[in-house]
Structure formats: structure tokens, C-alpha cells
Amino acid sequence: MPSVVGLLEQHELAARRRVDGLREEADRIHAELAAAEQEWQEWAIARKRVGTVLAPDGGNIADEEAAPGPRDADARSAPRQAAKPKSQVPVWCEGLAWSVLSVDYQRILEVLADRHRLHQGPLTCQELAVMFGLDAVPATVEALRSKAKRLVARGWLAERQPGRFTLAQGPDGQGGAS
């Protein structure tokens, strides 16, 4: 008859093997998930690019003025906001509501507006990812960086230090993401 200690060691060894097997499976699933997320993001980017190319004006909104209007949900119906509503980032101008932007861009502005109101400093894209509850993996961080850079180029955000974003002087948290 085996000893009690021997039986405990056998059970411990079996449990350890099960844990190791599950960890290997979890690592494999995590790697597969990361690859699938990367593929999904590439297809989303491709779809956006095709949408831009197929837009009535060829995706060129830089020359078009955004119609000033109220800073609420009614701003969505303003006649000259962008070629394709909420699919592109218009150049910021006085009176342009946040509602002309897609939800992703509005979320970035909301977080940075809150920090501005609380007199807190700028954020990196990694910090934004964590605040949004996303994994701070390179693909996610780069997607946020792309959005933030686009908002900087259009006057919604400022990047006074490389990689650190804050609300620009103009929008100043007043556009409200209604």
C-alpha cells in the first residue's frame, strides 16, 4: 500500500500536468486571438480606405467648410459637415460639434476633455488603451495613435510632446459628445 505522502505527490503531479496543459492551451488561444484581432483591424482599415475612395468627393474634405451649428445632436443634420457623415474627421472650426465624429474619436476627446477639466496632463496612446479597457498591445496602441494623430492634424487635439496627446485650445471640451 502506498504512503499518504506518495498519494499526495501523485495527485499533485496530476494537477500540475493539468495546469501546464491548460496554460499551453491558453497561450495558444491567446496567440490565435492576437492574430485574429490583427487580421480584423487590417480588414477594417481596408474597408475604411475603400469607403474613402468611393465617397462622392473622393474622400477630400479638407477644402470643404464645415457648417457652424449648434453643439448638440442637431449638428448631425448640418448640410456641409463632411462627405460621408461620421466616417471622416473634419477640420475643427468654431461651432463644430463633437457629434460629427465617430464614437471612437468622441471617446478620445471625452477622456482628454475630462483630464483638461481636472488640470491633468496629456496621455499616451498606451494610457488611452488602458483607460478604454483594451489590451495595450501594439496593434491596439497603433490604432489609437493613428486616430489621435488624425485628430491632431485636424485641430481637435494637440501633441506638444511626441506621443503625448491633449485637447487642443479650440475644442476645449465644449463640443460635448452628445
Image (spheres, rainbow, N blue to C red):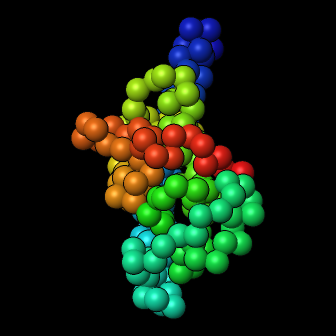
Q: Is residue 128 above or below residue 62?
A: above
Q: Residue 92: x and y, percent?
A: 47, 58
Name the residue nearer the viewer: 41 or 88. Answer: 88
Q: Is residue 77 above or below residue 19?
A: below
Q: Residue 56: x and y, percent?
A: 51, 91
Q: Viewed as shown, does residue 155 lie left or right of 109? A: left
- Quadrant where the N terminus sits is top right
Q: Is residue 169 above or below residue 45?
A: above
Name the residue nearer the viewer: 40 or 165. Answer: 165
Task: Identify the residue at the far left of this view.
Answer: 162
From where the camera sits, is residue 9 visible? yes
Name the residue nearer the viewer: 77 or 44. Answer: 77
Quadrant of res 59 = bottom left
From where the camera sits, is residue 47 visible? no
Q: Residue 14: x and y, percent?
A: 55, 30
Quadrant of res 101 = bottom right
Q: Residue 96: x and y, percent?
A: 57, 59
Give the residue at x 37% y 40%: 165
